[in-house]
Image (cartoon, helix red, strand yellow):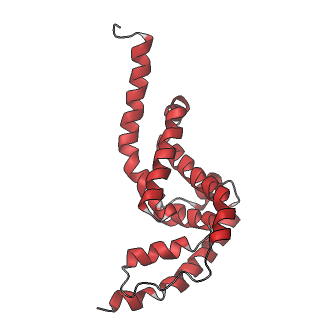
Amino acid sequence: MPPGTEHDQGHDSGLDFEAFARTAQRKLYRTAYLLCGDADGARDLTQTTLAKLFQHWRKVSAAEYPEAYARTVLTRTFLAERRRRLRDLLAHRHSDPGPRPEHAELRVTLLAALAELPPRARAMVVLRYWEDLSVETVAQLLRCSEGTVKSQCSRALAKLRTRLGEAHIYATES
């Protein structure tokens, strides 16, 4: 078909999505990794997010900040998946997670500590302190009050400080 036909215009919007996906994928993956705590889950979450963005690309591309839209989709997808799995997680949760490695790297220790937080609190901590979003923005993303973000982040940080207080033992041993 000659340039300018409907087929080419649809193809161009696909290229726009491809360009967006190439530039946004790495940042989405990093956030997904912090939310999920593992590479496989992060890849799945990133792919699911990109698939959802592709399905609604006209709306996404018309948004003032498509990156923020993508982060919102990623976060809400993570929370929705966690809610769906909550019963299974509780049914299969072990009260004793087993011995922790004696020489854990700080990053591994941090991910383990994040994994101990409830999904919503974990999302708040990641968005607030990793993504450096304002309390107001996190509240809007998660559809809750600013006070909820502040109180849950405060409680989550206290849990992380308690858990990570042990990290220096592992980090300083040879």
Left or right relative to 33: residue 119: right
Q: Is residue 146 above or below residue 28?
A: below
Q: Is residue 56 above or below residue 2?
A: below
143 displayed left or right of 42: right
Q: Quadrant of the C terminus?
A: bottom left
Q: How many marks?
A: 0
* Point 66% across, 55% down: residue: 84
Q: Quadrant of residue 15?
A: top left
**Nearer to me, 5 or 41:** 41
Above or below: residue 154 compared with residue 173: above
At horizontal 44% and vertical 57% (from top left) the residue drawn is 40
Tell me the quarter of the image containing the N terminus: top left
In this view of the protein, can residue 31 be seen by the observer? Answer: no
Percent position of residue 97, x then y: 54, 80
User: Where residue 135 sits in the image (x, y, percent)?
Assistant: 60, 61
Q: Is residue 107 above or below residue 103?
A: above
Q: Seen from this angle, which residue lies furthest top?
A: 2
Q: Residue at x 43, y 53 (%)?
A: 43
Q: Is residue 70 left or right of residue 150?
A: left
